[in-house]
Image (cartoon, rainbow, N blue to C red):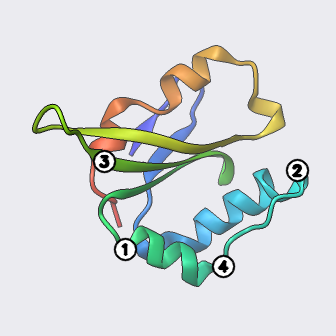
């Protein structure tokens, strides 16, 4: 887990934390009219090591999430990360320092901390 400059805790979730992931998506994705996945589908997604879901939490409430995939590179023996979806609470948008520092590189490569 990493803590940003304004007390935002960020961590990569494991399969047993699917409820938190769904809650973050419900709060941050559903208001824009997008469907929210089920706990079972998120748990299955998180059970695969190349799938990444990070959640940013402030005062026990999700304020952001990132859905990403680790992909093999064709040109070298190194993985790259494909950021598929990023959700940020309206109250935390346009605060460049949080976007830059809340999701440190270490969070992307660390295993889930569950």
Q: Residue at x 47, y 33 (%)?
A: 103
The Cα–Cα distance between marks 2 and 3, rounded to whole angstroms, is: 29 Å
Q: Nearer the viewer, mark 2 or mark 3?
A: 3
Which circle's residue, 4 or 1, is located before the other in the chain?
Answer: 4
Q: Nearer the viewer, mark 3 or mark 1?
A: 3
Which circle's residue, 4 or 3, is located before the other in the chain?
Answer: 4
Q: x, y percentage for residue 39?
A: 61, 79
Residue 42 appears left or right of 72:
right
The Cα–Cα distance between marks 3 and 1, rounded to whole angstroms, is: 16 Å
Residue closest to the eye, 57 or 103:
103
Label 3: state its secondary structure: strand
Q: x, y percentage for residue 18?
A: 54, 72
Vertical order, 114 against 58 (above or below) = below
Q: Residue at x 82, y 33 (%)?
A: 91
Vertical order, 16 against 32 (above or below) = below
Residue closest to the eye, 8 or 52:
52
Label 1: state its secondary structure: loop
Which circle's residue, 3 or 1, is located before the other in the chain?
Answer: 1
The local crowd at label 4, few if under 14, some if 14 to 19, many if 20 or more residues have their Cα within 10 Å, is few
The Cα–Cα distance between marks 4 and 1, rounded to whole angstroms, is: 14 Å
Q: Which residue is mark 2?
A: 32
Disc marking residue 38: 4
The Cα–Cα distance between marks 1 and 2, rounded to whole angstroms, is: 27 Å
Which circle's residue, 2 or 3, is located before the other in the chain?
Answer: 2
Residue 75 appears left or right of 106:
left
Q: Which residue is mark 3?
A: 71
Q: Quadrant where the C terminus lies?
A: bottom left
Q: Are marks 1 and 2 in contact (CB under 8 Å)?
A: no
Q: x, y percentage for residue 47?
A: 37, 74
Disc marking residue 47: 1
Label 2: state its secondary structure: helix
């Amino acid at each position: 887990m990493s803590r940003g400059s304004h007390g935002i805790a960020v961590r990569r979730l494991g399969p047993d934390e699917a409820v938190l992931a769904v809650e973050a998506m419900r709060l941050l994705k559903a208001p824009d009219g997008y469907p929210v996945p089920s706990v079972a589908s998120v748990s299955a997604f998180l059970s695969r090591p190349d799938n990444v879901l990070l959640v940013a939490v402030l005062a026990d409430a999700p304020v952001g999430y990132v859905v990403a995939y680790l992909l093999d590179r064709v040109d070298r023996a190194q993985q790259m990360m494909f950021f598929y979806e990023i959700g940020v609470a309206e109250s935390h948008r346009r605060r460049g320092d949080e976007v830059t520092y809340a999701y440190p590189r270490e969070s992307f490569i660390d295993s889930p901390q569950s």
